[in-house]
Image (cartoon, rainbow, N blue to C red):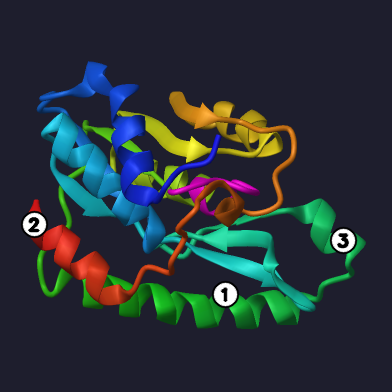
Amino acid sequence: MIFKNPQEAGQQLAEKLTPYKNNNQAIILGLPRGGVVVAYEVSKVLNLPLDIIVTRKIGAPNNEEFAIGSISEEGRGVFDEEAISEQMISKEYIDNQVKKEKKEIKRRLEKYREGQKPLDLKNKIAIIVDDGIATGSTVRAAINSAIEKGAKNVVVATPVIARDALKKISQEADEIIYLHAPILFYAVGQFYKDFTQTEDETVVNLLKKI
């Protein structure tokens, strides 16, 4: 399954989320940056409020694209202890990366919200949306963040997900909804014809539209 672009993927994903349409207890939470494009389309179709939940990946020393963990807005980490042990990654390296990514989380929250307060998740259904899930690290951090913010249920929704990540997230989210879980998964971009990088300004503009 190949999507034309994230907008099309979001529209198709929304069809599988119709049980939540007009549910005043549900909130759509996009993961910046690309996930917000998909989440925006979902929120339009379902007539639900849109907000963001920011997590940051911690990449391996010699391969930043390979996630050894992620941190949430609250600074809590989800780490792949097996990968860290196998690659003999030092605590000093991890601490430095966490410090750097905390600053980036703060920057993004300030940039995207422009002074607006986050939506209240207490006793709400948090529907976390991303454009694709490879390792599942950032989404797992987002699940923890939503729970910490008081969400009563956490739903993860994505157009495409790797099967290993599907197993992990199924154990942590109350529900997971997806369109495609391929056997071969190298990168999220392989499932989109147009996977142009989403800029900060796009995220800001989409949040203003809802």
Q: Residues within 10 Å of mark 1 (few under 14, many from 20)?
A: many
Q: CA distance from mark 2 to mark 3?
A: 45 Å
> Is 200 above or below relative to 118?
below
* x and y, in percent, of residue 197 in the image: 43, 69
Q: Earlier in the sequence, mark 1 or mark 3?
A: 3
* x and y, in percent, of residue 15 in the image: 29, 24
Residue placed under numbered mark 2 in the picture: 209
User: Do the numbered discs 1 and 3 sit on residues whose CB atoms are within 8 Å?
Assistant: no
- SS at circle 2: helix
* x and y, in percent, of residue 56 in the image: 50, 65
Query: Magenta segment range?
Result: 131-139
* Numbered disc in front, either 1 or 2: 2
Is residue 165 shown left or right of residue 142? right
Residue placed under numbered mark 3 in the picture: 85
Q: Nearer the viewer, residue 70 or 193?
A: 193
Mark 1: amino acid: Val
Q: State which quadrant residue 77 falls in.
A: bottom right
Mark 3: amino acid: Ser
Q: Earlier in the sequence, mark 2 or mark 3?
A: 3
